[in-house]
Image (cartoon, rainbow, N blue to C red):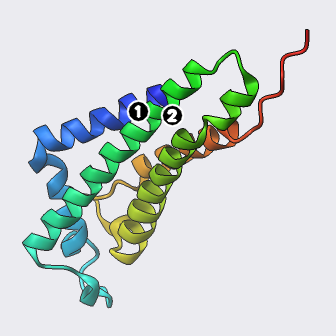
Amino acid sequence: MLLAFALYTGLVAIGNLTDYGSNFSLVEHVLRMDTTFPDNRVMWRAIESSLLHHVVYGFIIFIEIVIALLCCMGGLRLLQNLNDPLAFNQSKSYGILGLILGFILWFTGFMTIGGEWFLMWQSNVANSQEAAFRLVVIISLMLIHLTQMDAEKQS
């Protein structure tokens, strides 16, 4: 599961780097709040600085790369310790850290800050809350599974 999620997150990061403008547009609209309901009373939250838009998008891409690397390292460490339950349990830390970082990015970053603070939920153009929710559910299920202690094999 970790290697599959590392692949997914790595592909997302590569896509964001090689087609920078596509998802940058979403980040820019969310931060500008220019596709939210007209005349809402919290437009003071909008960020107009193009420089800050690029910084935020760069930070998102950087975090995606870190998540991909942590999940890849975690998955490989688990594969190396498949036959030793104690070592297997002790080698879960990179994967757990990667998944927690993913949860923070997509729940706190996209659903909470983007969705609620910048009112992304009001936009028909720049709303990635459904995609973020799917990832949060997948990550949560993976975390529940990964944090279970694996018992020693019975002979």
Give yes or no for contact between labels 1 and 2 (Cβ–Cβ under 8 Å): yes
Say which quadrant the C terminus sits in.
top right
Tell me the residue at 14%/47% (across/down). Answer: 22
Tell me the residue at 74%/25% (across/down). Answer: 85
Tell me the residue at 28%/76% (across/down). Answer: 37
Is residue 1 visible to the viewer in this orientation of the structure? no
Residue underneath mark 1: 6
Pointer 1 or 2: first along the chain: 1
Say which quadrant the N terminus sits in.
top right
Quarter of the image for residue 24 reads bottom left
Residue 30: x %, y % from top left: 25, 67
Callout 2 secondary element: helix
Instruction: Determine whether 153 is above or below 104 in the image.
Output: above
Q: Which mark is residue 74?
A: 2
Q: Is residue 128 left or right of residue 90?
A: left
Residue 88: x %, y % from top left: 67, 28
Tell me the kind of residue under disc 2: Gly
Q: Nearer the viewer, residue 33 or 105?
A: 105
Callout 1 secondary element: helix
Tell me the residue at 63%/40% (across/down). Answer: 141
> Dot 2: within a 10 Å radius of its alpha carbon, few (fewer than 14), some, or many (20 or more) residues?
many
Q: Is residue 71 left or right of residue 68?
A: right
Distance between the alpha carbons at the discs numbered 1 and 2: 9 Å
Question: Mark 1 or mark 2: which is in front?
Answer: 2
Q: Nearer the viewer, residue 21 or 71?
A: 71
